Image (spheres, rainbow, N blue to C red):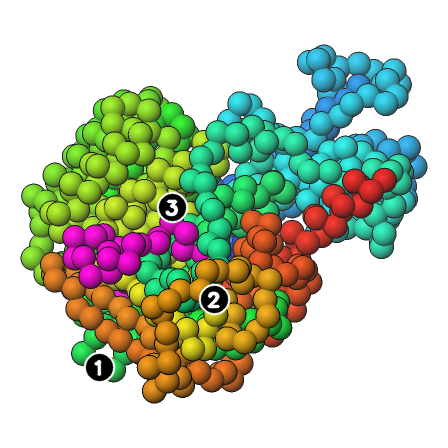
Amino acid sequence: MKKILLLGLMCLSTFLSFAQNIIGKVTDVNGDPILGATIKVKGTQTFTTSDFDGKYTIKAKKTDYLIFSYTGYDSEVVKVGDKKVINVKLQSSLEEVVVQAYRNTTIKRSVVASSIVTSRQFESKPNSSIVQTLQGQVAGQSIQTTNGYTVNTSSGQPGAHSNINIRGVSSINGNTEPLIVLDGVPVNEDVFRTINPDSIKSTKVLKDASATAMYGNRGVNGVIVISTTGEKQLEDPQLVIREVQTLFEQYRNNESYKEIEENPFEQTTAKPLSTFSIDVDKASYANVRRMINNGEFVNPHAVKIEEMINYFNYEYAQPTGKHPFNVETDVIQTPWNKDTQLVKIGLKGKEIDQKDLPASNLTFLIDVSGSMGSTNKLPLLKRAFQLLVNQMRPQDKVAIVVYAGAAGMVLEPTTGSEKEKIYEALENLNAGGSTAGGAGIELAYKIAQENFIKNGNNRVILATDGDFNVGASSDQAMEDLVVQKRESGVFLSVLGFGMGNYKDSKLETLADKGNGNHAYIDTIQEARRIFVKEFSGSMYAIAKDVKIQVEFNPNNVSAYRLIGYENRMLATQDFVDDKKDAGELGMGHTVTALFEVVPKGVDSGYLKEMTQLKYTDTSYRNSLKDELFTVKLRYKKPDGNKSIPMEFVQKNKVSAINEDVQFAAAVALFGMKLRKSDYSNQATLDDVISLAQKGRGKDADGYRAEFIRLVKSYRDGVNNQNALSER
């Protein structure tokens, strides 16, 4: 009997010690999935992260405890036991709101996802100002003197200046001013203090992940969302809203962008050819979105219309022939000018199932200098790269190089079967020191070349704010370095993070000259888009040095203008010069270019008087009078050195209007409005919204809906500023 009992206990012990797959979902208290939550087996190095739907899988024993954690949320510990499915709701670790003024009260703490004050609570607080009304109503709120000491409540000085802060947050230069959103529009604290408490319906306070998930980088210091019963009912009708002048004003002064001079109309008889490189970069749209969401001034040179258009995917047909991409063209009447036509040229890269992708040799080159210490830089970067690591297969490998005052390797090439080792290396990164970007690039390329995979995906992925200040650091020095390194066959992807000292000009140069692409990551959702949804397109090139040359028929086109692509223009002779660098095209990528053309015979103010040329008689071309233009393309295979030509002809006829061309036109028009273009023909932001709504289509991922919301937010801010300037 003892032997049987002992045998049973041994079997039970063996069973309990056997690791099994545990699956589940991590959500917030509202049931919304949390992306990037960490699930760790307590007392071990075993952990994983949740995907975009909040789902996870991890191996654990019945006796194990799982720790669920995410920045801004209270951790949860759950014993595995007999459970095969463990779903967890994380509670936001919201800390107190502080109103600084000349009053005294106790400091409280809230551990709920958000604090909400209703209109009924406002009615019970008949104070003269919104600051006094909120006091004691929002959990954890206190009022302190601006010079560091507190005074008795009854002796508070009327009219004292107050600043709203959410305790527990920190940022560059010590500024912790939260975003204040009044009826959906970002406002500053001056406007906040003038709100009539009687008009308030509710006030909600968001912090950490709750704030940044909804409002991007501007939410890093928390968000106070105020809803009113109707009109904003400001106590001072003269003050409506002014541009937010906070730390972000200082940020803009230290961000750098290449100056962009808008493409003009070219007369076809003098210049029938337009030659340019494709551009699959999408950084500009995400960066502009960040500025608008933050209530900032949008730098016109940060607006690259081609990158805004190409941020969105379009329903172009898959290639079926020998070439790796398909070409489509459309011609419609220009939505903002009845006298011109809008030409759309679209490319669609071939899609390949992820399991059939070639093996990857990746080198993460991560900036860990002091400028990367803020929440929206290195901490966000770690979460973003975890998503990329999740996509790795056993045949893929990655090394991690970091640089600050000097460069070094913190992870030797490691396969995708050792994800926990890669996660641990990422988590151990900390920011500090100066920025030797050139040394980091040298080392990263060296490691990538030493581990080169023939016919594989060899790529350096640089993540930085671009603030290089040690060694080779000028735009030209970085360009020379990358041009030299691209001959190795190693591609370069450049990821921009943060704001304030963001060096867009430098990062764009690196991507353009390194046979790569450039993206800007402002939220974990944007990271998921790049590393999960568009993983193949972002990481795998199917063609490089892709050039486009459009020849317009003078019989049918008087003038044309390429919308955007100003920094991608090529000389006519560069089209056939295989030594001239151009953009890469990734798997499944779509690329769109728009031209505005003036048809022959139309009297347009864009046409300039020209000297009549003696030797350009086009009568002999009458046989081609039914053609509007010809599109010529050249590209190289990812490992090739000789370009391959393609050619397509567009007949002189107007296409049926489709949702893709309408939406692309809406994005282009919005970019033109942001840049204060000379060619928007008095179109309004309402015209942009209307056009985008017509072109929204299925919009399965909601990106087009987000664009419409963004334009509305920008329009409302502009209208409020205009109202203020008129008073």
From the viewer's side, name the closer residue of 585 and 530. Answer: 585
User: What residue sits 18% from the left and 39% below the top?
Assistant: 444
Picture coordinates of residue 593, whole percent (x, y): 41, 65
Task: Write the start and end of the magenta stretch as one range.
Answer: 564-592
| Residue 559 placement, left or right of 515 | right
Note whether residue 85 is visible. no
Q: Secondary structure at mark 2?
A: strand
| Res 657 label | none
The amino acid sitting under disc 3 is Arg
Q: Which residue is mark 1?
A: 321
Label 1 is placed on what type of residue?
Answer: Gly
Amino acid type, mark 2? Ala
Q: Which one is closest to the eye, mark 1 or mark 2? A: 2
Query: From what the image shows, is residue 263 above or below residue 655?
Result: above
Is 78 placed left or right of 327 in the picture?
A: right
Mark 1: secondary structure: loop
Eyeballing the image, is 372 above or below 523? above
Q: Residue at x 32, y 60 (%)?
A: 275
Check disc 2 and report the residue beneath it: 559
Q: Is residue 60 above or below residue 327?
A: above
Which residue is label 3 attached to? 383
Disc 3 versus disc 1: nearer the observer: 1
Q: Residue at 54% of width from left, 44% of height from top?
A: 300
